[in-house]
Image (cartoon, rainbow, N blue to C red):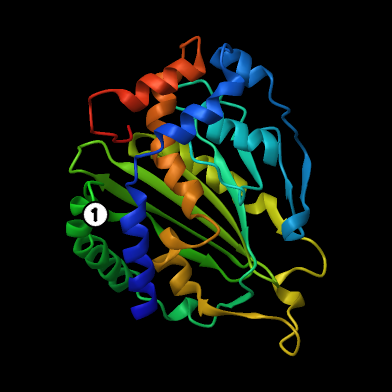
Amino acid sequence: MRIMAQRLLVAAALLCVVSFAASAQDSAQDEQGMSAEQFEQSLQFRSGQIEVPEARAHFNLDSDFRFLDKADARRVLEDMWGNPPDDSVLGLIVPRSPGLTEPESWAVVVTWSDDGYVSDEDASKIDYDDLLKTMQTATRESNPEREKAGYGSLDLVGWAVPPRYEAGSKKLYWARELAFNDQPNHTLNYDIRVLGRHGYLSLNAVSGMSELALVREGMDKLLPMAEFDQGARYADHNPSTDKVAAYGVATLIGGGLAAKAGLFAKLGLLLAKFWKLLLIGVLFLGGAIKKLFTRGDDNRTVR
């Protein structure tokens, strides 16, 4: 539990960072003069079977989803939504409906952790109520430091979707409800982890709690579409040669906010949802982002 609490403290200190003005302004320059609709039309969406060679994995996307490769995924996250640069992003899974420019839109950031084989021996022993209390305490205790640093407060309200581990498919999913600066409109942080031989695939969606039903339905559909390739599956693990992660399933959930493979994607999207809602309908993305980051209102809460 000590390792898990340490990860949570680090994550809590980072999650509310809002000082991305300079990087967002710079990254938006290439797209200046393009409307949000034109920007979306310039993206190269793919469908069907999608290979993720870095993770030796693939997605079998049905007609409900489309995929953006790394370059376009980063254009959306960094240029359209004003997130900081993040080279760990492998792609973006986008529902066909709602579209990226619609207020209720959401997307799934794909990243990969090569920490090694994650043992699931503890999966059936986890007390999720106790785990939640530990996470809430760690998050709450870190608030004075975050507020002192000018980042505001963060509270873990509870499970938006309780954790569940599917032992047969080696897939884990859960969702948190987060509150920033005591604002009434809370944030949904929905996670999927697909365990493989050499690490895990991370699928992360962030939206407003008002969109829980929409995102949950979409993530439930997406869950069976992610698979590792032959030879990289969990069942292919060779204990005599393969690297083993220094943590188990409990830490994936408890320390998930600080996991190397998902932190910055999550951090960006927590802010991106706010920026995105205001960008829609604005003709100049660069100018819009500049205005958003220099406005007087300090409450950067997610709808």
Tell me the quarter of the image containing the C terminus.
top left
Of 270 and 234, nearer the camera is 270
Q: Is residue 30 above or below residue 90?
A: above
Of 32 and 262, nearer the camera is 32
Question: Residue 117 lies in what quarter of the image?
Answer: bottom right
Residue 114: percent from the left, percent from the top? 65, 67
Judge left or right: residue 292 versus residue 38: left
Question: Taking the image as drawn, is residue 98 in sight?
Answer: no
Question: Taking the image as drawn, is residue 23 in sight?
Answer: yes
Disc 1 target residue:
146
Amino acid residing under circle 1:
Arg
Residue 124: percent from the left, percent from the top? 47, 78
Q: In percent of the image, x 23 and y 32: which residue is there?
A: 298
Q: In percent of the image, x 54 and y 25: which residue is there?
A: 28
Judge left or right: residue 216 versus residue 4: right
Judge left or right: residue 110 versus residue 263: right
SS assignment at label 1: helix
Of 77 and 41, nearer the camera is 77
